[in-house]
Structures are given as structure tokens and as C-alpha cells.
Amino acid sequence: MNNLEVKLPGMTLSNPIIPASGCFGFGYEFSEYYDINILGSFVFKGTTLNSRYGNPNPRIAETYAGMLNSIGLQNPGVEEVINCELVKLKKVYHKKVIANIGGSTEKEYLESVKLISKCSQIGAIELNISCPNVKDGGIHFGLNKDIAASLVKAVKSVTNLPVYVKLSPNVTDIVEIAKAVESAGADAITLINTLIGMRIDIKTGKPVLANTYGGLSGPAIKPVALRMVHQVYRNVSIPIIGVGGIMNASDVIEMMYAGATAVQIGTANLIDPYACKSIIEDLPKLMKELKINKISDIIGGSHI
Amino acid sequence: MSEEYLIKSNQEIAYNVFQMTLIGDTSKIKNPGQFMNIKIDDNYENFLRRPISISSYKENEMTIIYKIFGTGTKKLSYKKSGDLIDILCPLGNGFTIKKNTRKSILIGGGVGVPPLLELAKQLKNNKMDFDVIIGFPSHRDVFLENEFKKFSESIVVCTIDGSYGEKGNVLEVIKNKQISFDYYYACGPEKMLHALVKEGYIGQLSFEERMGCGFGACMGCSHKTIQSYKRICKEGPVLESSEVYIDE
């Protein structure tokens, strides 16, 4: 019996550790560092129907306990992902991968989802309705509950794969949107995408990011992520994948107590390519210390 | 889990410019111009690693030269001999030595100068003919002049304010002194690199970009080239002059 096993709709994970979209490329980049088959799964880089070059440089800014990015959904487009990136991935990764799909129109989302759903390597779709860096990158689908629900419904009708919906924290009421996507048929919710922020270079008086604003990630946002996962857990019954500032095994336990069934690791991978490997190795030791038998026992444990 | 290196020395060699020698595995370094990504410490104040080019290397020892620009490099300058430091290395492509050049030139600007030192060493080992021109803002900023002299008799140092060597930027001095070459290797500020490309010279240029990860995962340092986009950390930092795109 594997004490780290958790179940998400359509996928049983050997552990709850999932590298987050945009911080793990298409996976094979990390296989230079370790065998990525030890991961629960991973989410590949946000993909759109057509290729996107993203925003101008600089696209990265540093801040205390975190970073801002304004990449802007750079990706080679869904067909190239299928014909090239996933082929490369297949050589080094034998589990199911989660496909992060973005778009600017419903039609675009549906086309991409239809194409990617034909790939046997995909275990679930993560619907990205929360990229803060692209006006037409799907964010407007994530800010309004009715628009979000209508997109989820449409996507569900064109795929047999489970649909996880990645929500934006940049909203007034996260619970309202979570409930709406649940009603529309979402199989799980990923919480949270980055928080919108900025830095200013005091030597020039100008924003550091060429795009002015960017998405804040890293340990700085963990309390916000915990709070949102906690709030949403109380109000929906579908599983939540918790993401936001998780750096180590303790953070994983904390996020699962808040209500996450599995967790995504984002920024930690960028400063330490071995981050997920270390967390997976550290988890059993920490569980023993905390007298946790099965990790799935603690999901939402802070609510009792 | 990324590799720890032992600091052998860390000293100021020009105004706010430090040279750090590190002991550890260098067997994976393939080319001059590759870089490392340094974790300043475990404190989250300087959250991201700092990418710094390798200036020279040999078995189990490598040297970097960096300038204090902010709190991260400031903290790096406080590190002492005997300290351990967490480094991802080597990263990026580096320079490829071009065979069959009649005479090449190494062109460095400011903190872009360091990776050219190892290149000079390797060009000399390959018995290739080359000149060196390096530029700095002012006399107090000049470094590595004597080290380059070990590998080349022909080295020109220039300063913008004329306080040392030739007055002017590297490109002005190349033109004024009518230095001739059929190939170049350059590293320095983007303005300098773009100016070289615009002159129509053929060569390789090492670019700098703000990075998230340094190993190809985040797309933070994507740089537009004529054919496509390249990650400066992965398909770069060195680009061929023929692929450099200048947005104007």
C-alpha cells in the first residue's frame, strides 16, 4: 500500500506532487535532472490553438519571497505540442500528463481541447481561464461566473477527459466562480493562478516588466492560496488541486489540510530543478514525524 | 540537490567587480561562454538565482567575474573562501570556435568581458590568430587586461571617458584604429551587440536577459531571432550574427 497515493478524477496519482503549468516546460527539460516518472503527474506549459510568442522582455522580475512573470503564454500551438513536444516527452515519461489549455474564444478552446483529447498521453485537461498576462488569454472567462460556467459546459461536451478548471485569484468572490464551474460540470478545480503585481525600477522610475504588470508567484502568495483553497473546499464537493508558493513537504501537508487533494509545484522548480524530487522524498519522513499514516487522510483536515 | 561548490577565493579586482574561484565538478562544461546559475542563499530576499558566465575553467576549478549591481551580487561579494555555494552549471550553449578564420577578434564590453578569457585561451590552444578589444566606462572599471596578454599580444583596452587606453566605445575604436578581422566573438551590453550586427560583421554574440530558471523551463528569457524565438538560457546565450533580430 502506497501511503502517498491520492485520487483525482480520471487519474490515480502515486503521490500528490504535480509540477504546475509554465514552470515545467513539456517535462523532458527536467528529465536531464531526474527521472520524472516519480511525479504524481505534471501539467504542461499553457497551450493555445495557434503558436504564441508572448510578451516583450523583460518578462521576469524578482521580489521578496517570490517573482513576477509576464511570459504571455508563449507556446508552439497545440498541433506542434502534439507532434513534437509530446513525442519527445513519451521517450522519458510513461504516466499520464495534464494538458493546460488556454484560448481567447470559446471556439479556440474547443478546437484545442478536441485535438489534445485524441492523445493517449493526456490524463486530464486543465482549462486555463486565469492567465493574467494576456488580454485574450482566457482571463475574461475566469472573471465572470456565467462566462466561466458556459465555457466549462461547452468544453465538457467535446471531450471525454476529466476537466480541471484553473481559477484566477484576482476576483472579488472566488467561491462564486468555483461553485459556477462545479455546476457546469468541472471535475476538479485548480487554485490559484498568480496574483497580479508589479515592480518599479527606482533608477529609471519605470516598471521592471515590459508588460508593466505580471503574475506574482512563490512563497509570498502561499497564505492567499491556502485561504482560497480553504474557502472553496467548504463550498464545493469536487476535488481541489492546491497551488501557490509550495516550496517543501511541510507546505504540501499544509495545503492538503486546507482542502487540496493534490498540489502543484510551480516557482520552486525554477530555483531548484530538483524541488519536486526532494519534496517526494521528504514527504514520508515528515508524515512519520507528524504521525500521518495515509496522506489522503488529511485532505481538508483543518475543517473538522 | 544541485551541486555545492567550495569558494577558493573571492576578491575585488576592479571597482565593484569581484573575481570568485570555485572548486567542484567542471567536467560537464563544453564551451567557453557557458554560464552558471547561483543561489545567493536560502533566504527568500534574493529569491531567484543569479546567472553569471564562466570566465575560465580547468579540471575541478572555475572562475567567475561579477559586478555588484544589487543586493544579490552584494551578498555574493561577502562570501568568503571556504564557504559552500549552490550552483547549477554548466548552462547554455557557449561559443563555438569557428575554424578557417583568417583573423578573428574578441570584443568585450564591461561585465561581458569575462567569458572571452576562456575563449582566448582555447583559440590560442588551437593556434588561431586573434585580436582582443575590451571596453569599460572608466579606468577604475578595467579588469582582465593582463590575463588576456597571456594569450594574445594584440589587446586594446578602451574607456568611454578616455581615462585609460583608447578613448571611446569598442566599435568606435575598431573603426578609428582600422582593426581588421573576418570573424568576431562578442559579449557585452545589448546596444554594443546590436551595433556590431548593424555594421554587418559576421560572428557570434553572447546576449544577456533576465531569467527565471536558467535551464529552459519558464520561457522568461525568450529572445526574438530572425527565424524564431530562442531561450537565451538554453539555445543561447550565444547567437550567430545572422540570426540576431533588431527591433527598431
Image (cartoon, coloured by chain):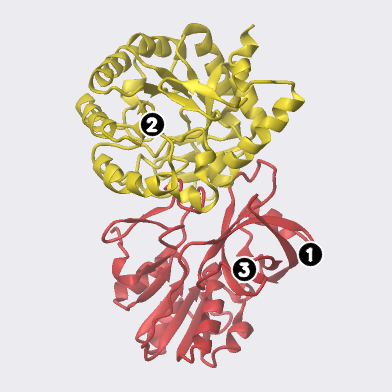
Q: Foreground: B44 or A57? A: B44
Q: Position of residue A303 (x, y in %)?
A: 62, 8
Chain shown red: that is B
Q: Is residue B94 above or below residue B105?
A: above
Residue sitting at 59 percent across and 32 percent down?
A246
User: What's the distance in space between the residues labelled 3 and 1, CA to CA?
Assistant: 19 Å
- The percent position of residue A42, horizontal first and vertical second, equals 46, 35
> In this picture, is A290 found above or below B163?
above
Left or right relative to A113: residue A260 = right
Q: Which residue is mark 1?
A: B81
Chain that the image shows in yellow: A
Q: Which residue is mark 2?
A: A131
Circle 3 sits on which residue? B26
Measure the alpha-carbon separation of dots 3 and 2.
40 Å
Where is residue A161? Give x, y as percent. Answer: 32, 24
Q: CA distance from mark 2 to mark 1?
A: 45 Å
Residue A114, by quadrant, is top left
Helix, strand, or loop for circle 1? loop
Q: Nearer the viewer, residue A38 or B148?
A: A38
Q: Amino acid at mark 1?
A: Ser
Residue A276 appears in which quarter of the rendering?
A: top right
- Check disc 2 and give the amino acid type: Cys
Chain letter of the residue beneath label 2 in the structure image: A
Q: Nearer the viewer, residue A123 or A43?
A: A123
